[in-house]
Amino acid sequence: MIPDNILPAAIVFSSLIPGLFIFLLDEKRHVLRTVLNMAGALAKLGLVGILILGVYEGRLIESRWTLAPGLDLVLSADALSVLFVTLSTVLWLVTTVYAIGYLEHSPHRSRFFGFFSLCVTATVGLALAGNLLTFVIFYEALTLATYPLVAHRGTPDSAQGARVYLAYTLGGGVLLLTGAVWLRSLAGPVDFSQGGMLSDLAGVYDGQLIVIFFLLLGGLGVKAALIPLHGWLPQAMVAPAPVSALLHAVAVVKAGAFGIIRVVYDIYGVVLAESLGLLSVLAVVTSVTIIYGSLRALSQDGLKKRLAYSTVSQVSYIALGASIFGPIATIGGVVHLVHQGIMKITLFFCAGNYAETLGVHKVSEMNGVGRRMPWTTLAFTVGALGMIGVPPMAGFVSKWYLGLGAAEAGSDWVLLVLVASSLLNAAYFFPILFRAWFKDPPARWPEEHISAGRLETAGALLWPPVVTAMLALAAGIFAAAPVSPLEWAELIARREYGL
Amino acid sequence: MTLRHLFLLGTLAVIGAALAWVFWDAVAVQAPGRLADMALDRVPESGVSNPVTAVLLNFRAYDTLLELAVLMAAILGIWSTGPDVPGFLPAGEVLEKLTAAIVPLLILSAGYLLWVGGHAPGGAFQAGALLGAAGVILRLSGRPDAGLPPLTWLRLTIVLGVLAFVAAALVLMAAGYGFLTFPLAVAKWVILAIESAATLAIGATLAAAYLAGEPLGVRT
Amino acid sequence: MIDWLALTVALPLLGSVLAAAIPARSPGIGMATGLLTTTAALSVGVLIAHAGELRSDLGGWGVPLGIALQADGLSGALLVMANLVALGISAYALGYFASGLRRHFWPLWLLLWSALNALFLAADVFNIYVTLELLGIAAAALGALTGGQAAIAANLRYLLVGLLGSMTYLLGVAILYTGLGTLDLRLAAESLTPGPLAWTAGALMLGGLLLKAALFPLHFWLPPAHAQAPAPVSAALSALVVKAAFYLVLRLWIDLFAPVVGPGPGILLGALGAGGVIWGSWRAFRSERLKLLAAYSTVAQVGYLFLFFPLLAAAALPKQQELLGALLLLALTHGFAKAGLFLSAGLLQKHAGHDRIAELGPAIRSLPAVAFAMGLAGVALVGLPPSGAFIAKWILLTESFAMDRWWWALVVLVGTLMASAYVFRLLANAFGPAAHQGAVELGGDVQTEKIGRMIQAPALLMALVAAVLLGLGAEPLWTLLGSRSP
Amino acid sequence: MATQLLFGLVGIILFLLGVWSFLAHRPLLRKLIALNVMGAGVFHVLVAVAYRGLEKTPDPIPHALVLTGIVVAVSATALALTLGQRLEHEDD
């Protein structure tokens, strides 16, 4: 049994150490690299299991390391971090399998999988971050770890995409850093604590607190792709499919959304945030983002680009949940952190499969893919319906709670936003499903890499989306089950509101 | 005389005035005791009776050690830039005779200055300067090697000063004294040894520096 | 009794003598000396950590008559850093220089090393002058080692500017002795009172040193000299020589002048530092050549160090200690990072036959270890986590907000963005079409060299120390500073 | 006293003349000479400080400093001259 003051650190190291070894591996050491990847992923899964138990029992689980006088690196587990850690760990496992199937024949594999592991290390680190300093450290580390993945292909447009990505994220990083040090100069060490930790500054420094909030929001909004800071996301599409999957479902955008939740609930405290009038601003920004993203998605023919804009819109549900005062909406936002992750990663896996198997990159090329690749398309359908919010899919649960919360908080216009966005989701997903299932396939596909055998495509590519699709279904159908994401979300909401 | 020059002149004038005032204030008004009396009182403990030599080779021997290192750095740097430049034509008879007379004299007086440095003005640097001058004269009068030994030996000569200094310091440290601490019993002789080594090194270095390059002995 | 302080100076001197006398054996002698010297420096560090400040009266005369060496937490930490970096540079130099240059490199290099140690331990204002000259002459000679016209011109200018600096400094020393009657730093600090003497002596001594520390706008000599020198020398110049000059400024500032000249000069130094951050980063961003980029980034990094001065002057004691620790951490990080960057640059230059950033892609991609070293060094230069520079900047930013001097923070943030611009402009080259073996891609005409593993190790190690070790393990620095003389 | 001040002032003036000519002239050789003039100025000041009237022996410390300074200056000048000589002469 691992002592509680080691466990969080161990969870971080479980992907860091394999990553470092992978860097040293020769390109050809395929087996060893796979073993390292999987070992790391499974070890992390096991450790997270222990962590969940501990947190459920309400034990204090924390690793602390002093960087400088008064500056501590703190990794600690509360209900919220456990939710995010579990999500990233599970999805990392799946994505690793997928990536192995997807990339094993392209160059620079050691570099890719090395940074891949660093990327999840950073994500888990900021999920477990116990104070703002730690969060900032891992937030920047995430930028550094993902940049090589976006640039990986080395083509001119991937170089361009990576440059844009870096410009946005480093810029945001500076904003976040500014807000963080400013806040520290006012409040001392900023430890995340449920219900917030600034209550005693309220009334004294209100003005500064508001400015700081927007600095932090600016920094986090970049990764969360809030309007107008979303510009990098569609550009980053040039990355290989597993990377896009990870960026969109787990790592980058989620880091932003998760950070916003942290700031609202565990730094400012929802009450203070409300009284400073910050929540309403956030609500407006997120609503605009939701609508804008969906509208842009409508007009995209590139499948990954359409999914990218749908991410812009979907991730904002999370922040929207945080921006509405009241536990119900909180539940909706927090649970969407998980649901959007599972559904979106499914969609990207499928998009990758179409591209890898048939060379299909555009929506207009998708006629009849359902017949050629039924399983993949089935998974895609599940993800799409979930995004639209069709009952009993996971997405429906999130939107239901968001809507309920909005109604309870008396901000009815949010309901309109939800309805509108759902209609838009339907408008840009149904045509795809229709083409895929009901139109006739073309005589020959753009470029068919993998011919149909016993399976419609390589196994390593097929299983991950199927698995995540089933997870998405389960999350919706068994929402009421004891350890479902919804249950955790409710636990979190109870603790945040001290109910 | 551009505007820039005028501006420069003005600034320098102001600085000069300030400096002059501060100097006057420090010398005439403050007039602190400074180290003279303390130094003069303790000259007898230094092993030599010439105060300046006592300061150079004992009180502040560390400065002198590093100063010899500076000389060494300079000549090594000069050598690293390439081979020496070709010398001058052989001298005419008169100059030849003159050289033959002066160089021995210079060497002799160098030796004298070295010895006298212990109790009267003089010492390693003055002596070394004379040796260097002898080298320069030889070079001017057509000796391409300025009377210096072949490179292998020359290398040994130019490092001699630092070597003697450091060796003495380390040996005495090993013997239980502090670094650069010369026990009175042996101080006189240690200092004389160091000074002799330094004289040779300085002389050789100055002469070699005049060759403006490494004397590899390759002549066309 | 063993005088470790003196040994750190004497050993390299002795090694230099031997290397100069026996040129054929110079690499072996050099490496052995390097190891011994580093050991001595490390023991100095350990002794300070345990026994607090060290001081030794050379010749046993005691100040003011004699000369003393002293080491406290500040100088001790820098001494250890300098020796570790110098050791890495030596290991690199073993494989770098062709036999022709070796016999010239080692004795001068050891003299430079000795001068560095002597400066970090110096406690006597005139002795500092002598040591500075030793440093300057050895540095200029090493910088001109390649013998190219540009290199000689740049280093001749460097030598002359250095002399201007030390002459100015020396006049300051003369004035100080005239007024105070002592050359020992501590005694001078005790008897120095506010007034014209303090101002003039301070202006002359600090002014001279600032020229050597390349504080904007006195940096003009640095980029050509550092960019033209052979890679190991550039690394030493940028990482150590400039640092030594900066350390002297800091030492004289906190021990001697800050207490008696008021806040004005501190603010001036900070403002010039800000100028250096902006201008240096900008020029680095515009540089076509890798080594020039690295040299200009040194100008910027020196600027960062001076940003601390106004805050140091304004802060009360506990805060002051915290800031001083951050300043020290930044200096150490930059020492390792810049050395790593220049050594990597040297390898790329050897491999590609040039250092034009735009065309370095293939070379970088065929040397992944070097690419990594540059990446890590870059992270440390920008000040991204987990580098030591990040922690240092975090503290600097927090304090400047806490003291309502947010404009200094603004400079740091802008500088950070500019730094990431020039660093990632370089690193972007690491991604591109897969690298086949060097020469093939590089085209026939340029001469390329095979780069062994051993020579890549020092660059990578130093970059790692800067980007990770100093970030996560810096806390002991403050305990070390706790043993600083008041 | 007067002697001392006179020497000190001469030293300061020499130093400033050196600075002037270092900054005002481009040729490296002239800059080098300027530096040596500055050095001479500083040494003057030090010698002046050492003076304690004709009846008392002068302060040996500044004398020693001057000797050291001279040797250092000579070394630097020698290296600078050699480097200058290795340059093609278009720049001075």
Image (cartoon, rainbow, N blue to C red):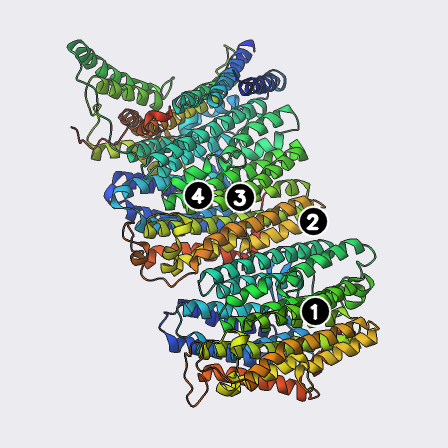
Q: Residue A269, percent across and down?
A: 77, 66
Residue C92 in picture, x, y percent from top left = 35, 51
Q: Tell me, yes or no, whether the two marked residues, 3 and 1, touch with CB atoms within 8 Å.
A: no
Judging depth in this view, the residue of D26 and A483 nearest the camera is D26
Say which amino acid is labelled 3.
Trp
Q: Nearer the viewer, mark 2 or mark 4?
A: 4
User: Identity of the amino acid at label 1?
Assistant: Ile
Q: Are marks 2 and 3 on the same chain?
A: yes
Disc 2 + disc 4, Cβ < 8 Å: no
The chain letter for the residue carrying disc 2 is C
Displayed quadrant of residue A402: bottom right
User: Which residue is rendered at x = 73% and y = 66% of the image?
Assistant: A264
Dot 2: within a 10 Å radius of its alpha carbon, few (fewer than 14), some, or many (20 or more) residues? many
* Residue situated in front as seen by the camera: B57 or A134: A134
In which quarter of the view is residue C461 placed? bottom left
**What kind of element bears circle 2?**
helix
Q: Chain of mark 1?
A: A
Q: CA distance from mark 1 to mark 4?
A: 49 Å
To which residue does mark 4 refer?
Answer: C292
Which is nearer the eye, B34 or A152? Answer: A152
Q: Secondary structure at mark 4?
A: helix
Please tell me whether residue C35 is drawn above or below residue A96 in the rendered image: above
> Callout 3 environment at 10 Å: few (<14), some (14 to 19), or many (20+)?
many
Vertical placement of residue C444 versus C308, above or below: below
In the depicted structure, whether residue D57 falls above or below residue C208: above
